[in-house]
Amino acid sequence: MTIRFIDSHLYTGIFPVGYAAARQQWLKQVAGLNSQKQQLSFGCTGSGPDSEDLATDTVWIGPENAERLVVVIAGTHGVEGFAGSAIQIDLLRLLIKGVATLPENTALLLLHALTPWGYAWSRRCDADGVDLNRNVVDFSKALPETPDYQLIRQALFEQDTGQRQQLLSAFADQYGRIALEKAISGGQYLDPEGPFYGGKQAAHGRLVCEELILHYELKQRRLAVIDLHTGLGSYGYGEIICDHTPESAGSAIARQWYGDSVTLPLAGTSSSVPKLGLLDYLWHAVMHDDGCYITLEFGSYSTDQLFNILLRDHQLWAQTDNDAARTAHSAIMRQHFCPNDPAWREMVLFRGRQVIGQALNGVSS
């Protein structure tokens, strides 16, 4: 993929103000593509704050029989879709202008708003409180046990922020900071009202991915998957997180394509701790040794702030009569996961172009 950055201004005005506007803008750009394409949309139950319909929209760009494919996913965690939408819309604009081109025998598959309910309501989860990125477990078997979450659950729902932080700090002092982060964010399958809940059955976004894998026969292709996320890590930096095991072919391919900036949670080199039920694992199962899945995670504010904001979000949604407080908190969620800062947004667009270009070059090499 060739991108002439000098000729292509980083226009931060493409960052959407909400899910409905993002979908409209995304569909408009897709309609403007002159290249070969195929669109599929997957409706989602529920509706948005203005009673708008919800859907995950997808587009395949390039030859149907392409042996190589780059998949770009936006909105796995709903509210993180603001940046994901902007990166996809920016890419579509570059393709329409001819500033970006696809390598020979290579296609592009964009998944927009994989958790549309969360995107519309400025939450990470779906309407059932399910975190799609903890949902990829075998629900026909006993679900993973999470005893550390049970130990801190009462602290997570402590209304007094100072008291909650004191209780969590005590846990960290006893078991370590990494143990605390894993207990909070590693995934749990007991508590629908709590954070990072993996659910009891396959969620909408997982079903969409499974359907696309079958429809496009992705097991037969060489895959590079980029899952766009925000909210964790250094401000404005796009960390390439690889959840393939450290000595696997997938992690070796990731380093080959993206260089030494790749971090691995299982090796302790990432801002992310190891987690249960990641969406990565669904795609790992259909990949060959010549492909890889990465998360491109754009940092914003501190991990402690992230946890405080998310815990407050779950506290508010566990109540039934707090619409005004929820609405006010939605703005706080959006600011954490997509800061209203032109410099941050420029960094996101630049890094998005860079990493998608690396993926296209790598998968087509």
Image (tube, rainbow, N blue to C red):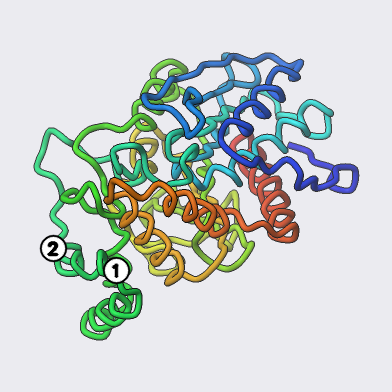
C-alpha distance separating marks 2 and 1: 22 Å
Q: Earlier in the sequence, mark 2 or mark 1?
A: 2
Give the number of the disc on residue 147: 2
Which residue: 22% across, 53% down?
Answer: 188
- Camera-nearest residue between 156 and 190: 156
The image shows residue 60, relative to residue 344, as above or below, that is: above
Give coordinates of residue 297: x percent, y percent. 53, 55
Is 77 placed left or right of 349 in the picture?
Answer: left
Q: Number of numbered discs present?
A: 2
> Which dot, 2 or 1, sits closer to the camera?
1
Q: Secondary structure at mark 1?
A: loop
- Camera-nearest residue between 216 and 34: 34
- Camera-nearest residue between 243 and 84: 84
Decide: few, some or many residues near mark 2? Use Cα within 10 Å; few <14, some 14-19, many ≥20.
few
Q: Is residue 207 visible?
A: yes
Give coordinates of residue 348: x percent, y percent. 67, 53
Decide: few, some or many residues near mark 1? Use Cα within 10 Å; few <14, some 14-19, many ≥20.
few
- Camera-nearest residue between 158 and 251: 158
Is 280 placed left or right of 35 in the picture?
Answer: left
Give coordinates of residue 232: x percent, y percent. 49, 62
Q: Amino acid at mark 2?
A: Pro
Give coordinates of residue 220: x percent, y percent. 44, 22
Which residue: 75% across, 19% down?
Answer: 32
Q: Is residue 183 visible?
A: no
Is 342 placed left or right of 324 in the picture?
Answer: right
Q: Quadrant of residue 335?
A: bottom right
Give the number of the disc on residue 31: none
Q: Secondary structure at mark 2?
A: helix
* Residue that carries the numbered disc 1 in the rendered image: 159
Q: Residue furthest right?
A: 7
Q: Amino acid at mark 1?
A: Gln
